[in-house]
Image (cartoon, coloured by chain):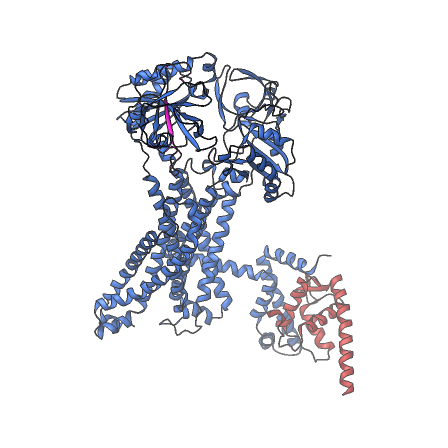
Chain colours: A red, B blue
Amino acid sequence: MEEKRERSGDLVQGTLDMLILKVLALGRAHGYAIAESIHQRSEDVLRVEESALYPALHRLELRGLLAADWGISENNRRARFYRLTARGRKYLEAESARWNRMTAAIARVMETG
Amino acid sequence: MLPEWMTAIGLRIRALFRRRQLERDLDDELEFHLAMHQQKLVNQGMPPEEARYAARRAFGNPTQTKETSHDLWTFRFLETLWQDLRYGLRQLCRNPGFTIVAVLTLALGIGANAAIFSVLYQDLIRPLPYPHADRLVMFGVDVPALDSRPFFFGFTYLGLRHEQTPFESMASWRPGVQGCDIAGPQPQRMDCVLAESTFLPTFGIQPVLGRNFTSEEDLPGGPPVCLISYGMWRSRFGGNRAALGQLLSIDGNPTRIVGILPRDFEWPTLARVDIVLPEKLPASANGQSPGMALRAYARLKPGVSMAQAREQLHPFLERFIQSAPPMFRKEIRLGLISVREDQVGSVRQALWVLFGATLALLLLATANVTNLLLARAEARQHELAVRAALGASRWRLARLRLIESLLLGLGGGMAGLGLAFLFLRVCVVLAPAGIPRIGQVHLGAPALILIAVISLFSGLLCGAGSSLAFRPSGLLLVGRSTGSLRGRLRPALIAAQVAVSLVLLVGAGLLLHTLWNIQNIPLGMETNHVITAEVTLGNRFSSQPGEAAEFFQRLETSLTGLPGVTGVAVSDSLPPSGAEHSMPFFVIHPEGHPPFEKGTGGMVAWRAVTPGYFKMLDIPIIGGRGFVAADRDPDVNVIILSKKLAGRLFPGENPIGRRLQFTPPGLPWYDVVGIAANVKNAGLTREADPEYYMIRKDSPDLGQPRSPDLQRHAFFLVRSPLAARGVESMVRGAIASLDPTLPATFSTLDARVDQLRERPRFDAVLTALFALLGLLLAAIGLFGLVSYSVARRTHEIGIRMALGAERGDVVRMVVGQGLRLVLIGVAIGIAGALALTRFLSSLLYGVTPTDPLTFIAVSLILIAVALLACYIPARRAAKVDPMVALRYE
């Protein structure tokens, strides 16, 4: 039950998952880089809270959508790198399609107002 | 690709084995994040120290994040379960008194259950060792006057072979497994049985080696062949295949072994069988020969029910009835019962009753433990409230207590296993012969499964009961308990316990009453100080006429000369079990009377005895005289009638000096010389049959040419004031000095009679044991509740006493409260017992299932015990010092 609870990070969990997957579609990255990447690409609108990010990463890993291994970061520190699995890629495609349909639909509703 | 949930479980299991690694990785990962953030802030120009704090602030609560992730990676449920389990164990160990009482209470219920279930399983549930055993039946005609079990006359059975029956196959055998002598280098007495060649196929049994005998071998004059048991094959032939085809001298007849029976072979009557010989029935019933009595088994055609089979056999029954003597006709029924029913018979009811009693005992035990747990929950209310305040969910708290009670249940199960062994010993000691196969009963897998199931179940029940009834208030204001448990559950439990206990006690009371009645049935004879030796001569004696009679006479003389022996008598059978010899009443023909109409009068028992018989058993001769030595002369024909028979044959006349004859005519006339008092001769609980006595003559056929078995089989009765064991060894020695190979079975007449009481004793003693344990549990429960309520009301009682209540008032108040519950329980219990005791009726003798005396006596006993259980805590309450009580708290 707890896992479904909306975190204070302003992002619904499913959306956060999708964003993480999207970032990782561009290549492997560690948790910090993922958070930064989302932050920057949203032009500082979205801020991913760490307390939401790491549980989300682990959850995705347990679902087999991500794989993780330890590597050396750009500043020579030991870091955990995540990458997309085949299943994750498929899931991302489905989710993006659904998201696009949804936003388009919402946009249409809003426009008619 | 694996489904998602399996990937997750796989990853989690991998994490389970690298827990420390997992912890470190989580730490490292978050640490790295913080370091990166700090680096970024430093790069933006923040001083390193400040950057570190800023990064931490931005992160929020790392511990919580870590825990969330940790929980994702592990089986959180199992982890807390493990915690709770250890916590529960610690709690139980901390209160050893409570734990021991609770575990023992449950063990009592579980152990009794498992023991009785084992007996029940062995006799009623265990699959019979035949394929599709549910289609196997025993059938025949049921004529209670002639036999207690269904039987056939040879010609009736042969006739049925050619008819349409509901059976796939049928098989007959000669009733009675007989001793037979194997000659050779190691002579042995084995148990032989004569069965039709269709016997093995009907039961679906294959010999492990060799073959069944053929239908040709099963005809009169066919080649002599036999099947031997697996046990005999192992012991006599060392399990050698060469045993097949060997000749075995059975009662002097060389007989070829054609097959070995399987190891788990079981004769359907459960009798021990070593050798199966062909029955050799003629192919058809030609002539009017009434034929020997047979028993028959059959396999129903697939899909045919017992009711349908009955229907289809109806024409056969009709024809049989028409052929029977008119007076028997009304009594004839079709006998069709399952093989299991034939094996188990009346034991079924007794075992189910006992199993019910142990279930009731288990309920009582569970109720007691629930009560204990409730009391403890209240004592621990403070602790529970603290835990709730610290964030434990209600579910978690309930689970904690459930785990504790499950642990209690498991402990009870383990201790119950030990008790089950004990109870089973009691069963075996009580009824070595009264319950089929009791010797083979053991705590097998089914009983162990039952123990596991009921210990979990009872644990769960106690835990659920106490958890549901008790809700911690969630507040810490619990110095003085205000929990809702005072509610209704505990008193209701006590009333229910009293009710269940009463039902048990009534059952036990009725069965004990029955046992008492059976113990005190007047037998019409004296059984003290009489040793019995049952002797069956081997087949070699029959080759020379008169040899057997001579042997018996020599043995009689030799026993009479033993020191300390005050009397010796010989008979062919002994009361009070059913007589081995009986004949229809109408064949007796008193002189001067027209012959009785055929088929009238039922059966008459008879025995051939020596003159000492009446004195030996102290059977009074109420008219005329007893037998004297001179009567043994082959040319003297005298007879003694029982009072009952004399009254039937010579109503209103003096029978002494009259003569009688047996049909067919041509046999000698017998002079009636005496009338003996009636003796129980058809079992303990059935009414005595009329009876007459002949004398064992000094002639080769003992004066009984028509009963050749008399010449091989006899009971020797020896009266001596000495200890039975000493006399027995003297008698054994006397027999051995005449023939060292002759097997003899020793007993005392007391023990033989007592054997007939085994069954009622088994029923009564076990039920009484369970009822007493149940009463004890109910009393303990009541005692606990009253003590508890007194302890809680100390303050109130103090006030009452300060305001002038006398000690007697306090005792009355406390006892009165307990008694109210007891009376409610008794009322419910009486209603329950009235509804249930009719299931006992087939087990009762001389007492009705609703015997008011038993009901009243049992209720009074229960109330007395309950009063005692209330009085002890009440007295303690009355000793309360008002000053102390008021200062208290």
Viewport quadrant of the C terminus of chain B = bottom left
Q: Which residues are magenta?
A: B678-705
Queried whether the magenta region covers residue B681, the answer comes back as yes
Viewport quadrant of the N terminus of chain B = bottom right
Q: Is residue B178 left or right of residue B870?
A: right
Queried whether the magenta region covers residue B244, the answer comes back as no
Q: Is residue B352 left or right of residue B194?
A: left
Q: Quadrant of residue B368?
A: bottom left
Residue B311 is situated, as x and y percent measured from the top left of the image, at 60, 42
Foreground residue among B767 and B662: B662
Q: Is residue A91 left or right of residue B394?
A: right
Residue B252 is situated, as x and y percent measured from the top left of the image, at 52, 15
Residue B878 is situated, as x and y percent measured from the top left of the image, at 24, 66
Residue B312 lies, with reference to residue B364, above or below; the image says above
Q: Quadrant of residue B589?
A: top left
Instruction: Farthest residue to the bottom: give it.
Output: A113
Foreground residue among A60 and B675: B675
Look at 49% across and 70% down and name the residue there.
Answer: B391
Look at 35% across and 42% down and name the residue there.
Answer: B515
Residue B804 lies, with reference to residue B461, above or below; the image says below
> Residue B112, can we see it?
no
Q: Mostly what secondary structure, the magenta segment?
A: loop
